[in-house]
Amino acid sequence: MNLPSFATALLGAALLTSLTGAAETPARADEAKALPSLNMEATVKAAQIDPRRAGNTLTPGAKAGVLLVERALRDRNLLDARWVDGHFGTTTVAAYAKYQRSLGYTGLDANGLPGKTSLAKLGAGRFTVTRTIGPGARVSTGGVIVNTRTRDMLAEAERLLGRDLVLEQGSYNPGGDPTSAGTHDGGGVVDISVKGMSSATRTAAVRALRRVGFAAWVRSPDQGDWPWHIHAAAISDTDLSSQAQHQTGDYYLGLNGLANRNPDDGPKVTIRTWEEYQRR
Ligand SMILES: [Zn+2]
């Protein structure tokens, strides 16, 4: 071996070492970034539908995210291993509510539905959260309180309908209307006046509300202790009360959202959340 080629070999080895050395840091950074991602929209969808299913069928597209949540709950000793199955049923909802209470949350913040903040905390070091949903701040509109997500949905429904909607009851209204059985306690839920609306207009209003992501129905006096009105619950609003979560879950399952769980009596519309509607 002559000297120049020996030097070249040495240089080559040094280069190799420095290259592999340099490559190590980015590799570690990639590893940290390679946490699985959890689709919040799909997970929240399952958390509404699965507790309402008769069996333990999974919600399509939600299994991976639900499993990430369930394993994290199991590791915190909040969920028995036998419930780690990708089905966000009543036991998982109860475990999630327990987890929310363990963070010091109370009331709606411990409603068992994964919210942006609690999910991010649960995922620390385990998963990253994508497709996040936020109900937004509470605002006053038409004399009632709703959150900004609901307000924007109502504005878009009015645009589709070509007519203003008058709110009779808003959200975050615990005990405001004893006939509502808790559905208006949380976010995402409104009652709309049908005064001056023909039967066809009522149906058109429900269709517009459904198109933008509400589970909405015309309610008649023969269904309950209430006058004619439209009841609407914003699908996947993470502030939904338990009762309203059941209604949005039932809506996905083709039911009417009432205690009798009769078939849906409203206009058929492709079911989309507000986020899905905005991406359509
Ligand atoms: Zn209502």
Image: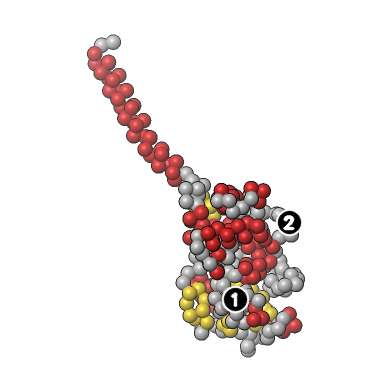
Instruction: Give percent across and percent down for residue 265.
Output: 72, 73
Q: Residues within 10 Å of mark 2 (few under 14, many from 20)?
A: few
Q: Residue at x 50, y 49 (%)?
A: 127
User: In the image as oriented, which residue stretches furthest toward the left?
Assistant: 3
In this orientation, which residue lies closer to the viewer: 207 or 237?
A: 237
| Residue that badge 1 annotates | 184
Image disc number at residue 227: none
| Residue that badge 2 annotates | 55
The secondary structure type at the circle numbered 2 is loop
The three-letter amino acid code for the residue at tag 2 is: Gly
Q: Dividing the picture into quarters, in which one does residue 173 lie? A: bottom right
The three-letter amino acid code for the residue at tag 1 is: His
Q: Is mark 1 within 8 Å of ligand 1?
A: yes
In this orientation, which residue lies closer to the viewer: 152 or 138?
A: 138
Q: Is residue 33 left or right of residue 261?
A: left
Q: Is residue 132 visible?
A: no
Q: Is residue 62 visible?
A: yes
92 to 32, vertically: above or below:
below
Q: Residue at x 55, y 51 (%)?
A: 76
In this orientation, which residue lies closer to the viewer: 184 or 158?
A: 184
The Cα–Cα distance between marks 1 and 2, rounded to whole angstroms, is 28 Å
